[in-house]
Amino acid sequence: MKKSLFRLTDMLELSIAYIFCFFLNLLFDYVKTLDLDAYLLKAFLKNFIDYQSLIVLLFTFVVIVFHYQMLYRKNLEIFCRILVGDTVFNITIRYILDCLTILIFVYLLSAFINVHLNFNLTGNFYLVLIFITYILISVRQVRKYENF
Amino acid sequence: MKIFKYIVSKIFLRKAILGIGMVLLLCMANYITFTAVRSILSTFQGYQETRYINQEGFYIANLDPDSHIEMNTVRENGTQAVYDYINNNFNYAFYADGFIVSVPNIDDMEISLVYMNKEYYKLNQFELLQGTDLEFDYQFDKEIPVLIGKGLSKTYPVGSTIEIEESVLGRPITLKVQGILKQNAHHSNYYALNSKIYYNFSVLFPVNEEFINHANIDLQLNGLMDITILQTTKEEISNLSEVIKDNLGLKFNFFSQKENYNYINKYYFHTLKIISITTIILLIVITCLSIWNALVSVRLMLKDFTINLLVGLSYSKLKKIFYGYFGILSFIDLAVIFIITAFNRYGCWLRKDATFATYGLFGLIGMDWLALLLVAASDIIIGMIVVESMLWKIKKIPISLGVLQ
């Protein structure tokens, strides 16, 4: 943790971004299970439920913004670490592991809620794959700051 | 303008991800606002329409949810007996729609026949673009005067005739165009006020007592479902329910004005309240995310802003630039919402969905434009909050410190 690029506020920020996306997906799944007798409400919610994946996907952009801004802010830190003997490979691995730890923690939390509400466990899993893709793409930015 | 272009291209666009993030958040906010506003407006429009038919002393029929129609058991003389009873004892507004016929027209749409009697027609006060009002005293073995929607007016101008091979009378009939309805004339479902059908490709067909007596069981039964008994009492309505039960084996409820308003107040206003609260909560969440995105932008672009402030850019000018930039992002989102709506509306024309095809710029009707206007207003409010938070953050940091960053 000592060598991590993440500070407590960064971890909190990323956790909140992940929680927001998982919660949004969970909210959609929950709304789908409601037995609404109000036609008007059903018609209103249908406008969103029909596009659930797209809406959740668009909101995951918040996570992209987080990765982008965090690594942009840390460019000097990355360069300094390399100056004092650290390697880009190690920094990258640590960054990936930190992101994955937070992601797994949040996913397990959402999976627990899924089990509690009797929802399909795989319902949230596609988000994990999306977030892993974002992490892998953002890793390229770490390498970019090798030559500050 | 020069400085605006410079700051947008050299500062904002160099970190385009943050701009895209803001566009997506605003897009979500706009979509939510637009959907909610349109639902509310459409329901309110439907509510206004029901006021014509929901008056003191009027009773609107409704098939009991537990009573199921079995067409084999319903006999034609049963429905006829019910209509005989209604004709002898009541004044009533008759309405039945959903009868699709194939009539050639230049838009190649399927035509929907809408049957209504004189009382229903008088209560609804249809506005005409051309021609004269419907006449109900006609000989149905001759030409029947009808009103048509605007979409049919190009093929069938006033005075022309329409041949229909299959009709509810079981034989071909000839219709004579008496008038043309104003564009986007519509009817709201009594039990789903936000749901509408548009009459642009419909034929408004006048029915009288003789016509109903000669019509097939489909029209008679369909008309009974939405029949409104005018100026009557609870006792007389109970007798009618008994007559329907005896002849058709169906349980019909007739609701008075008070009962209908109680239902609307309990059901619709409660639902609208839920929709409004949900929308406001979602908008607050999205505004918070937008503020976060804006503060992140300030954090990353602080150096650029402060250097410009150092060389003479004033805070008021910077504020104007921020508003201009946010205005561009809002405009992009409004255009996206417009395209989605136009795609949905125009899709009805492409799918040849006659009951939902509307006239207007790309099919957008008044309700859509009003919703877009309110979306623009919500964008202004979100924009003010976001821009002021950005400026607050910039002002909080001394210029010298910002430059050093």
Image: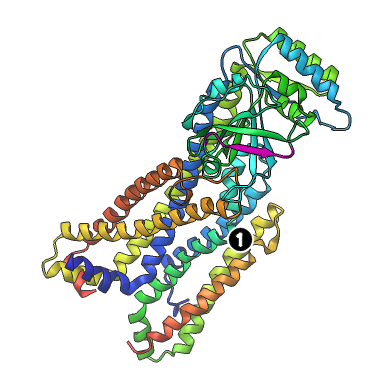
Local packing at callout 1 (Cα closer than 10 Å; few below 14, some 14-19, many 20+) is few
- Tell me if residue B76 comes above or below residue B4 in the rendering: above
Question: At x 54% / y 35%, what residue is drawn?
Answer: B186
Element under disc 1: helix
- Nearest the viewer among B171 and B373 is B171
Check the picture and name the quadrant holding the N terminus of chain B. bottom left
- Nearest the viewer among B314 and A40 is A40
Please name the residue that numbered disc 1 is placed on.
A109
Residue at the right extreme of this rendering: B73
User: Is residue B327 among the parts visible in the rendering?
Assistant: yes
- Percent from the top left, x then y, of residue B308? 17, 69
Asked which quadrant contains residue A82, the reply is: bottom left
User: Which region is colored magenta?
Assistant: B158-166
Left or right of residue B120: residue B299: left
Left or right of residue A83: residue B65: right
Check the picture and name the quadrant holding the C terminus of chain B. bottom left
- Percent from the top left, x then y, of residue B401? 19, 69
In which chain is the residue bearing label 1? A
- Nearest the viewer among B192 and B325 is B192
- Tell me if residue A111 comes above or below residue B259 in the rendering: below
Question: At x 28% / y 58%, what residue is drawn?
Answer: B390
- Percent from the top left, x then y, of residue A44? 56, 44
Is B164 part of what is drawn in magenta?
Answer: yes
Give the residue type at disc 1: Leu
Question: At x 57% / y 64%, what residue is drawn?
Answer: A106
